[in-house]
Image (cartoon, grey):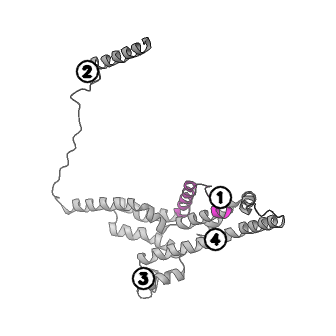
């Protein structure tokens, strides 16, 4: 009873202290609050409207930047080939997706650096200095990208997209619109990535077949061949310096 009485007395004493100290813990009444005032006024000149449209266009481009990187650069081929490497070895989560995407992104910067340099020197710098208009800067910026895509796209993919667009047969590269070139380029990138992936799969399939034949001849039917062949495939990949070979092959395929 003494313990219960003491504990109840302690709770009551704490509650009394909270009531007495209410004013000490209260927040001050006059707290400054920031007021945001947006003044909407009619534009005084067409330049104000043009500046607003440029800001909207810039925000749109920034939001579509990942899609642009996927469409007109070497990112797609590199990422698909790295994915084939992981699947062929049999490692489902190693390396993680974040590592593969980051590696593909930096390899994209490496392979596309000459194109970015041309865009910066011929388009961005003169436009910032006010030496060319927006349309002229766009034309200068899109030309190196089109040249890069034309150097990688195949005639079959380009003919396919031209026929799907129901347009006359182009006589030269200038007659091919960008809306036709970009999907043809992406199809070609996927095609080349799968071709490289098949070559990567072959040696690992041979290892799986050898291990499965040995286990079958030894009567170990219940032992999964993938469980035994996985260390051998990793060892083969490390001994052959596989990452250097894969990166060298992918980067060299763009030259």
From the viewer's perspective, is 87 left or right of 236? left
Determine the residue positioned at 44% across, 64% down: 67
The residue that disc 2 covers is 23
Using the image as rendered, state which of residue 87 and residue 50 is in the foreground: 87
Query: Most extreme residue toward the right, as rendered?
Result: 218
State the separation of the CA atoms marked 1 and 2.
63 Å
**Disc 3 to disc 1: CB gap under 8 Å:** no
Closer to us: mark 4 or mark 2?
Answer: 2
Label at residue 91: 1
Indicate the quadrant containing the N terminus: top left, top right, bottom left or bottom right: top left
Label at residue 175: 3
Closer to us: mark 3 or mark 4?
Answer: 4
Q: Pinpoint residue 165: horizontal percent, then vertical percent.
A: 41, 83
Q: Label 2 neighbourhood size at 10 Å, few (<14), some (14-19), many (20+)?
A: few
Sequence-wise, which precedes: disc 1 or disc 2? Answer: 2
Q: What secondary structure is marked by label 3?
A: helix
Q: Is residue 98 magenta?
A: yes
Q: What secondary structure is marked by label 2?
A: helix
Q: Quadrant of residue 54?
A: bottom left
Using the image as rendered, state which of residue 39 and residue 139 is in the foreground: 39
**Magenta region, mostly helix, strand or loop?**
helix
Q: Label 4 neighbourhood size at 10 Å, few (<14), some (14-19), many (20+)?
A: many
Sequence-wise, which precedes: disc 3 or disc 2? Answer: 2
The residue that disc 4 covers is 196
Sequence-wise, which precedes: disc 3 or disc 1? Answer: 1
Using the image as rendered, state which of residue 194 and residue 53 is in the foreground: 194
Sequence-wise, which precedes: disc 4 or disc 2? Answer: 2
Part of the protein shown in magenta: 85-113
State the separation of the CA atoms marked 4 and 2.
74 Å
Q: Pinpoint residue 198: horizontal percent, then vertical percent.
A: 65, 72
């Amino acid at each position: 009873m003494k313990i219960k009485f003491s504990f109840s007395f302690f709770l009551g004493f704490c509650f009394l202290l909270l009531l007495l100290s209410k004013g000490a813990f209260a927040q001050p009444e006059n707290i400054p609050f920031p007021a945001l005032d947006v003044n909407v006024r009619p534009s005084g000149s067409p330049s104000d409207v043009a500046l607003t449209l440029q800001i909207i266009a810039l925000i749109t481009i920034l939001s579509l930047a990942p899609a642009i990187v996927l469409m007109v650069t070497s990112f797609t081929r590199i990422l698909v080939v790295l994915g084939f490497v992981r699947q062929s070895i049999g490692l489902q989560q190693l390396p993680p997706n974040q590592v593969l995407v980051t590696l593909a992104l930096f390899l994209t910067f490496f392979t596309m650096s000459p194109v970015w340099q041309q865009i910066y020197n011929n388009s961005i710098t003169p436009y910032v200095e006010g030496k060319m208009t927006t349309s002229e800067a766009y034309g200068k910026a899109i030309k190196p990208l089109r040249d890069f895509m034309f150097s990688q796209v195949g005639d079959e993919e380009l003919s396919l997209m031209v026929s799907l667009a129901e347009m006359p047969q182009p006589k030269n590269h200038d007659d091919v619109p960008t809306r036709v070139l970009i999907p043809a380029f992406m199809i070609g990138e996927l095609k080349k990535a799968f071709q490289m992936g098949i070559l990567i799969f072959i040696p690992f399939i041979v290892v799986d077949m050898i291990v499965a034949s040995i286990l079958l001849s030894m009567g170990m039917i219940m032992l999964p061949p993938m469980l035994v062949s996985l260390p051998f495939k990793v060892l083969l990949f490390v001994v052959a310096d596989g990452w250097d070979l894969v990166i060298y092959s992918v980067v060299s395929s763009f030259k």
